[in-house]
Image: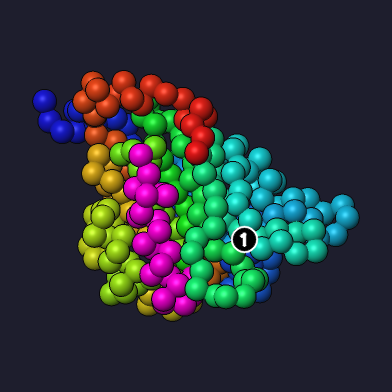
Amino acid sequence: MTQSDKSGRTFRILTYNVHRWLGTDRKISPTRIAEVIASCEPDIVALQEVRVGRSRQGEKDQAASLAYALGMDLHFQPTIKILGEQYGIAILSRHSSGVVKSGRLPTQSTRPSFEKRSALWVATEIDGHRINVINAHLSLRSGERRAQASALVGPDWIGHPDCADPAILLGDFNAPPYSRSYRMIANRMVDAQLSNSHGQPQPTFHTRAPILRLDHVFVTKSVEVVNAAPVRNMLTRIASDHFPLLAELRVRSLSPASDAGEARSPLSVTL
């Protein structure tokens, strides 16, 4: 029996910095973002720079409307709250899912920060496998970003006993591959874009002149990467300042002992 015979079906996971729904044409359009996501047919979506709530009476909650249009469950972690509106990160899933943990990442600022950099951990079930998914959006400041990367692979997140393989860490890390914060994570997990069937990994930012690879999908050892690459077309070039990064993955079959551990419902786990 080949390895692929022992593996489950493939599934798609997408990470996308939606830039507050603001496109490079300066138009705010959650509908356009929904079109991008729908065209990728993902099972799981990790979003950064998400606007939630209403700024004026009568306006729709844009994130909730997006999730409804896509037929996906929405889990949201705010990083900014102002004037009745929220802004932050989110995970959408087509499958049974629940939040395991959400919380702030380390900061080096001694004063209250406007944006509280955070991570969101959701457990979902696909093809009988419990899959841990952690979405994060890291700081623009290098020292703070290193502290946040270290925390993500530490005992509170990826290193937590409940965050068992298979697990996926993804998001906008503001960290190119030559950075120390990227290497902290890549030394512990596999960068999915290293399995890009189109050749070398491709940059994800900026959509007008892509030169930086800031958005990443990292996976643990039982997750097989079939393919991973930014989605580049006319729509994604204007919908946001980041390209969405799409990965096609498959979970390799686990041992009977591991499968027994996975029988636990993802909705039952709390920290």
| Picture layout, residue 192 above or below residue 127 | below
Note whether residue 48 is visible. Answer: yes
- Please give the residue where the numbered disc 1 appears in the rendered image: 79
Q: Residue at left 43%, top 44%?
A: 133
Q: What is the quadrant of the N terminus in the image?
A: top left
Name the residue furthest right.
57
Q: Residue at left 66%, top 40%?
A: 68
Residue 128 image offset from top left, x and y in percent:
37, 25
Q: Secondary structure at mark 1?
A: strand
Q: Is residue 5 left or right of residue 40?
A: left
| Picture layout, residue 209 above or below residue 5 | below
| Picture layout, residue 52 above or below residue 207 | above
Viewer-closest of 269 and 192? 269
Verify whether residue 140 appears in magenta. Answer: yes
Q: Is residue 184 left or right of residue 267?
A: left
Residue 37 image offset from top left, x and y in percent:
53, 50
Quarter-of-image position of residue 258:
top left
Name the residue furthest left.
1
Name the residue furthest front.
110
Q: Residue at left 60%, top 52%?
A: 77
Residue 217 image offset from top left, x and y in percent:
36, 55
Note whether residue 95 is visible. Answer: no
| Picture layout, residue 195 above or below residue 6 | below
Quarter-of-image position of residue 56:
bottom right
Q: Is residue 157 left or right of residue 178?
A: right
Viewer-closest of 8 and 110? 110
Disc 1 marks which amino acid?
A: Thr
Boundaries of the magenta span: 139-161
Q: Residue at left 54%, top 63%?
A: 117
